[in-house]
Image (cartoon, rainbow, N blue to C red):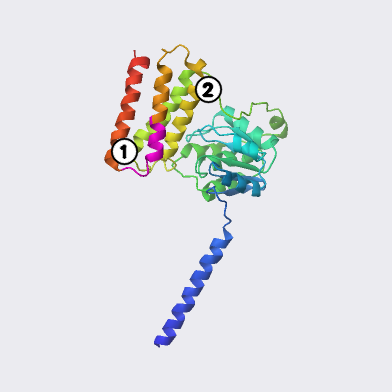
Amino acid sequence: MKILCKCMAGIFLFIACTGEVQKQKSLPSYPGLENVFALSSGVWSGSQPKTAEAFLSLEKLKIKTVISVDQSLPSQSLAQEYKMKYIHLPIHYYGISPKREKQLIQAFFRLPKPIYIHCFRGQHRSVAAGVFALLSMGNITRERALSLLKEGGTSPVYSGLHRKIEQAKVLSSSMIEELEEPLPEKVEFTSFRSLMVNIGRHYKQLQKMKEQSWQTPADHPDLQVTHQLGVIQSYLTKAIESPQLFEEQPEDFSELLQKAKKEILSLQKDFSSIQLPELEKRWWKLDQSCQNCHQKYRDE
């Protein structure tokens, strides 16, 4: 009886292991990328490609166009190296603006395929944006669109994204062909105020995580501290490289931006390795720097 039990246990273990191996083999690997997911023939969604390894994975998928719907400013250098067109159409978690709707549809209609659309992690905004474009073009049904949101991992807490799919209308071929929206490589800020408003939005998200011991909040599962710091850092870099945006500010304003960028880069680099007391101390220093700047230049 003992021998029989051992044999049965061995058989069950073998079946379980074999099934796991087969399951793992059925999931293709895309080094440098996460949550890679096929939305339709020639359209993929996934995480932000940041490295040469990631672009090699895109090359294997024969990607010709990369669309970022993330807020961070994309780097064009790797895309150019791998001969891919890279455009920037950022959207928010609460939905997609009418202008951005047109740009997404136009991009999917006119730009060469295969297309890879990404946000930060590749689960929420990129899936929703890609599904919206495909549905609006009549390439998929609404039932399939809602199913793709679920399969792709778009969280129900982002009700604005789900509502956009539920309410999307299919455009006629003539309406799509008439679209003439710009498809920028990087979204440009037309004023210093608009730039600072965007920085403030991400700063508030960091404050929200701080209040929860730097954990991802349940009502915003896509938030990550280092990514939010990286977005702010990219905006500060843009401000520093665009002095015309703050030409009416005092001479030392550029120095303050440089200092803030340095502190954010340092915190982003060290975040995963420093203890909570030191993290709180450095955050307080950064927060005080922001408050002092606001008091001096914004609140007066």
Eye-nearest disc, 2 or 1: 1
Question: Is residue 3 depicted above or below 32 in this figure?
Answer: below
Q: What residue is pinned by disc 2?
A: 189
Kindly identify the amino acid type of the residue bearing the numbered disc 2: Phe
Q: Residue 63: horizontal and vertical position, in percent?
A: 66, 44
Please tell me which residue lies in front, 220 or 24. 24
What's the residue type where badge 1 is placed? Leu
Q: Pointer 2 and pointer 1: residues touching (CB < 8 Å)?
A: no
**Does 265 lie within the magenta span?**
yes
Residue farthest along the bottom direction in this orientation:
1
Mark 2 and mark 1: span between their CA atoms? 31 Å
Q: Position of residue 117 (x, y in %)?
A: 59, 40
SS at badge 1:
helix
Q: Nearer the viewer, residue 71 or 288?
A: 288
Query: What residue does disc 1 label?
Result: 279
Task: Please name the residue shown 50% across and 40% down the image.
Answer: 120
* 244 is higher (above) or lower (below) than 161: above
**Residue 299's quadrant in the figure?**
top left
Q: Which picture quadrant has residue 262?
A: top left
Residue numbers of the magenta segment = 263-274
Query: Can residue 168 be seen?
Result: no
Say which element carries label 2. loop
For disc 1, the neighbor class at 10 Å (few under 14, some 14 to 19, many from 20) is: some
- The disc placed on residue 242 is none
Q: Considering depth in this image, is 137 or 84 the residue closer to the camera?
A: 84
Magenta stretch prevailing secondary structure: helix
Instruction: Write the residue at 43% across / 27% down.
Output: 199
Quadrant of the rendering where the N terminus is positioned:
bottom left
